[in-house]
Image (spheres, rainbow, N blue to C red):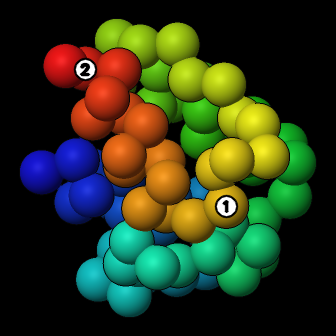
Amino acid sequence: MTLEKVAEMISEISDMEASEITTETALSDLGIDSLDIAELVLNLENEFGVKLEMDGSLKTVGDIVAKLDALKA
């Protein structure tokens, strides 16, 4: 569930289709800039009701999903 929602939100700001985005997809491969990442973080925080810190530990979509799942628990 989390992966599907995150992939959908990423596809809205990138050139990738949601179906192409997996947990292994690197954020650097999404073709989005720092402004897009800031927008994504804000959207994820609003959608999931959490505070998400974009730090060096978040390198893949899977890292974001794991962080969101941990914060929701």
Q: Residue 69, image x and y in percent?
A: 27, 35
Look at 86% across and 58% down and name the residue there. Answer: 33
- The tally of labels here is 2
Question: In the rendered image, which residue does mark 2 sit on?
Answer: 72
Look at 48% across and 47% down and name the residue there. Answer: 64
- Residue type pointed to by label 2: Lys
Question: What kind of element bears circle 1?
Answer: loop
Please give left or right for residue 41 compared with residue 63 in the image.
right
Give the distance between the C-alpha atoms of the residues marked 1 and 2, in whole angstroms.
Answer: 20 Å
Q: Residue 44, image x and y in percent?
A: 46, 31
Question: In the rendered image, which residue does mark 1 sit on?
Answer: 59
Q: Quadrant of the C terminus?
A: top left
Look at 31% across and 29% down and name the residue there. Answer: 70
Precedes in sequence: disc 1 or disc 2: 1
Q: Nearer the viewer, residue 49 or 12?
A: 49
Q: Residue 35, image x and y in percent?
A: 85, 43
Question: What kind of element bears circle 2?
Answer: helix
Look at 66% across and 25% down and name the residue there. Answer: 53
- Residue type pointed to by label 1: Lys
The crowd level at tag 1 (other Cα within 10 Å; few <14, some 14-19, many 20+) is some
Please give left or right for residue 3 compared with residue 32 in the image.
left
Q: Which mark is residue 17?
A: none
